[in-house]
Amino acid sequence: MSERLQLIEAELDTLYLISQVLNSAHELQAKLQGVLEILHKKAGMRSGMITLREIDDDSMIVCAVHTNGSGVPIQAVRYHAGEGLIGTILDAGSTIVVDKVINEPRFLGRLGLYDPELPFIGSPIFMEKSDLVGVLAAQPDSDSFLGERARFMEMVANLIAQSVKMLRSIERKQRDLLNERDHLKQTLIKNYGFENIIGHSAPMIKVFDVIRQVAKWNTTVLIRGESGTGKEVVANAIHFNSGCSGGPFLKLNCAALPDTLLESELFGHEKGAFSGAVGLRKGRFELANNGTLFLDEIGEISASFQAKLLRVLQEGEFERVGGTQTLHVNVRIIAATNRNLEEQVTEGNFREDLYYRLNVMPILMPSLRERTEDIPQLAEFLLDRISQQQGDRPLEIKESAIRLLMKHNWPGNVRELANRLERAAIMSTNGIIDRDVMVCTGLEDDIGSGISQKPPVNRTVDFNDENMDDRERVIAALEQSGWVQAKAARILNMTPRQIAYRIQTLGITMKQI
């Protein structure tokens, strides 16, 4: 076999081995080192070196070297365009072949790799036609067939370029994701800062003082207050201003799920734990590890589930549904309820030990009736949000409308205020909300002559009364639960889906409060 054919056969074998290395799961540095080792052992290309262009710089930095059958430490050596042989290739963007290194005045020899008596070949690494990202250089073991060997080096450089292109694409995506994550994190912190909890009334100042203090520590918090008073907003502020703000923040409405689903949601389940469990699923406690878990409507959980919840709060451990492995988590708990838990404990509906475990640091959210002086500021804040929802539509509220709002009793608290303002914004043709527009929302009917209503009196309803038909029973449950479907479903021993279907079939119009 002729010497040329032997060379071609060796180069084909080398290209195959190099393609395997570059397609492996190793990191780029290990791949490049492997390529130089194969060039040395299989193709007689000694003293290999690969430089890559810095992403934020036009210079080339040495990424991998190989000589005498072993790797050598990579030094912090850079080449700029036009500097030495590598810089010349960078500047010209084409392969350079030198018959003998000792005769080349542009050779710098910074790494001490090259034999001055041997040839030198350097090929550019192009990701795209005009995007030069590096240089592959090595010394043939003889001066035979330098043209063929130069073309071979260009083929290897092309293979390297594909790996570099893929890596750079992944790095760019990761960098974009990290930037997006940091941006979203800063936005969350900004949106849930203490300054975004609206109110300067005396009751709210007390709330702010407690929130600032409790955010410093990893203690359990129980936020109490009527529906619509902003308990979730406070939970967000505590998390994003605490030491675990870098961790996850998960939420779960305990009233929205029956016990079986609630256990699976919180603790997760193993594959085959029950019908429909086609795979392993992590629960909220597991997902919230080293972060915060917000349990809304904690007063709605059943007595049987309270014992299971108590264990994880006390010990920080649990098992997935259908599993035997005990999992340990470090989760900060923020709970919220609008129920009187003390009465629940006295009546035997809520475990006393769970109550004390949750009520470590209570925060009582005042009703809107108790802080009417905050209504003007709240109205402006809510209108800004409504304006954004309506395509940055200019909205303005007049003093006459504010006075009307401040006379209302607000049984639905801030949630009802937001509802009224959105309705008024829709009904205002020019974006100006005055007294007449607010009256059109039905607000004047609620307050009559301007004298505030007395708080609604909760009356006891016998849901087993045979004289009540289905429609009356569902409406009574909705009234008693503040028109929250999930709560009404619990009262009637239904699932949320069942009561939603019953509301639809009975033609019940839901109140928005």
Image: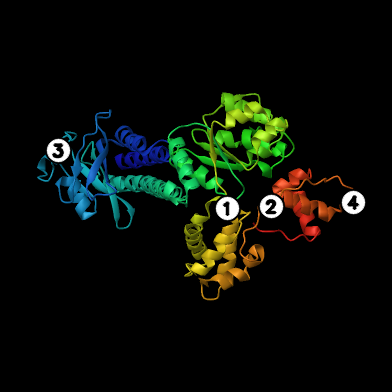
User: Could you say where residue 128 lies in the image, as x and y percent from the top left?
Assistant: 34, 55
| Above or below, 65 relative to 167 | above
Q: Mark 4: which secondary structure?
A: loop
- Mark 2, Cα crowd under 10 Å, few <14 / some 14-19 / many 20+, is few
List the residue tagged with mark 1. 369
Answer with mark 2 or mark 4, whichever residue precedes in sequence. 2
Which residue is disc 3 drawn over? 109
Q: In which quarter of the image is residue 348?
A: top right
- Between marks 1 and 2, how big is the CA–CA gap? 12 Å
Instruction: Decide if residue 260 is on the left or right side of residue 386.
Output: right
Provide the residue designation for mark 2: 456
Using the numbered discs, state the Cα–Cα distance from disc 3 to disc 4 in whole angstroms. 101 Å
Q: How many residues crowd around disc 1 within 10 Å: few (fewer than 14), some, or many (20 or more)? A: many
How far apart are the alpha carbons under marks 3 and 2? Answer: 90 Å
Instruction: Give the amino acid at mark 1.
Output: Arg
- 7 up-or-down from 453: above or below: above
Single out the mark in the foreground, 3 or 2. 2
Residue 46 in the figure: left or right of residue 433: left
Residue named by callout 4: 467
Q: Nearer the viewer, residue 202 or 22?
A: 202
